[in-house]
Image (cartoon, rainbow, N blue to C red):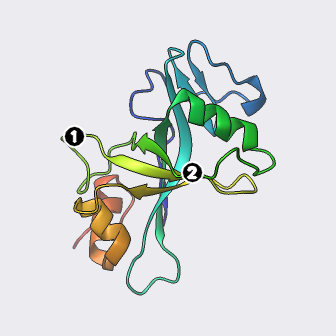
Amino acid sequence: MDMAAHTPDPWPDEPTYEPNSALRLEGNFLSEDFCVLEGEHFFVRSLLEIPVDGLERPWGFGCWSTLSRTNFEKYVAGFDDGEYEDDGPWFGWLSNRLKIYFDEGEPIGVHVLPHPNRQRPRLIVKDQDHPLAIAQRDGITAEPMLSLLRAYGHGPTVQ
């Protein structure tokens, strides 16, 4: 029941993935794991998890986060072997809207935590008073998760 965003919200085109090995730090680049916009904005595909009452594992939102160029380069350098110059957390901005939690307003700052073995970094919302941080910390019931899925056309309809 996880959900994924194919590109960061600012990506200007339809998603056409290039191989990770073709990574360019200039212009626009999109692979399944890395994104560069105009050689100035750097993104990594990540995972934001929310515990759901009654489920064995958290609900996952496969999304994108920004990184500074320095941290992006650290992430890329350690991507294959899971050995990072530093293990973070690194600062980023959540780069996909998540309806009911983040549909309008200010961007959400996140801690980006790299993981070994090509696992996507985990995101933790920085502002502990934000509703999304509260959901990450305390968990949610099934109904908000189903509302999220329905908002994106994936959940069961209400009869």
Residue at horizontal 30 percent and vertical 79 percent from the top: 141
Picture residue at 39% right of the left edge, 58% below the top = 154
Instruction: Tell which tag, 1 or 2, sits nearer the viewer.
Output: 2
**Front in this rendered view, residue 68 or 120:** 68
- Whether 109 is drawn above or below 30: the answer is below
**Residue at the spot of label 2:** 88
Instruction: Tell me the quadrant of the picture where the C terminus can be found.
Output: bottom left
Q: Image quadrant of residue 149?
A: bottom left
Determine contact: label 1, label 2, CB under 8 Å: no
Type of amino acid at the residue the image marks with label 2: Gly
Residue 70 falls left or right of residue 142 = right
In the rendered structure, find residue 20 and report the number of the disc placed on it.
Answer: none
Residue type at tag 1: Glu
In the image, farthest residue toward the bottom: 54
Q: Residue at x 74, y 43 (%)?
A: 78
Give percent across and percent down for residue 42. 52, 29
Q: Position of residue 96 (x, y in %)?
A: 38, 42
Q: Outermost residue, right direction?
A: 81
Please say whether residue 102 is visible from this viewpoint. Answer: yes
For label 2, the SS is: loop
Q: Residue furthest left?
A: 105
| Neighbour tally class for label 1: few under 14, some 14-19, many 20 plus, Cα within 10 Å | few
In this view, the residue in front, 143 or 128, is 128
Q: Is residue 3 left or right of residue 100?
A: right
In which quadrant of the rendered view does residue 129 lie?
Answer: bottom left
The percent position of residue 91, horizontal first and vertical second, equals 45, 44
As drawn, which residue projects farthest toward the front? Answer: 86
N-terminal-most mark, 1 or 2: 2
Q: Position of residue 52 (x, y in %)?
A: 39, 77
Identify residue for label 1: 106
The mark tally for this picture is 2
Examine the rendering and report whether any part of residue 139 can be seen: no
